[in-house]
Image: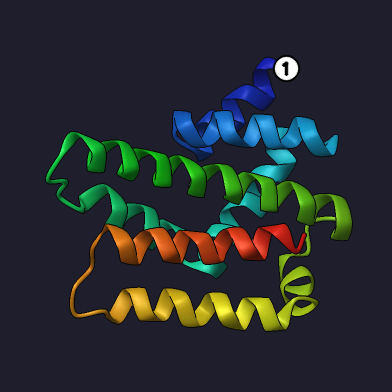
Amino acid sequence: MPEAAASQLAASADTATALTVVTAAETCGTTPVELVDVYAEVGQRLHLSWLTDRLAQLPPSSHWQIMERDSLIDDMVTEQGRLAAVIQQTTGGDVGAWLAARSGLVSAWDAAIDTAQHAGSQDFSLFAITCRKLMDLGRAA
């Protein structure tokens, strides 16, 4: 990657995000700098930052829950990158158009994330099922 592009990408994302964006860009044949805005918009539109933040804050009660939490976070970051790549490839980066074409699945996702955000008790099971709903949306890609 050219140094100028790497600097621009590094300024717009943390290291884990940058690596995900670089990998996703390679899969769809674009540059990471072009894809980072799509990645960010996907996260914003689907409330993925909220989800990963809540997962990171969820106190584990065992080593297995630590592993589950870390796996779920990794899955969400990877899926966000994969969605960004698909959207870039199929719509030229038009997140709104891509989501509108999948309105039924997006509605199911919106209901799942809304339930998670307003649940009286947030636990690993709730977040695992919520993450699964995002994967359902991604499989439709």
Q: 62 left or right of 72?
A: left
Please name the residue shown 60% across and 31% down the image.
8
* Type of the residue with mark 1: Pro
Q: Nearer the viewer, residue 113 or 18?
A: 113
Q: Which image quadrant: the C terminus?
A: bottom right
Residue 119 screen position, x and y as percent: 26, 79
Residue under numbered circle 1: 2
Please name the residue shown 28% across and 81% down the image.
118
Please name the residue shown 42% across and 57% down the image.
49
Residue 34 screen position, x and y as percent: 74, 42
Q: Which image quadrant: the N terminus?
A: top right
Q: Vertical placement of 98 versus 110: above or below?
A: above
Q: Vertical placement of 101 versus 23: above or below?
A: below
Residue 113 screen position, x and y as percent: 43, 74
Query: Secondary structure beneath disc 1?
Result: loop
Please name the residue shown 47% across and 59% down the image.
131
Question: Toward which corner of the image does residue 67 lie, by quadrant?
Answer: top left
Q: Vertical placement of 132 versus 32: above or below?
A: below
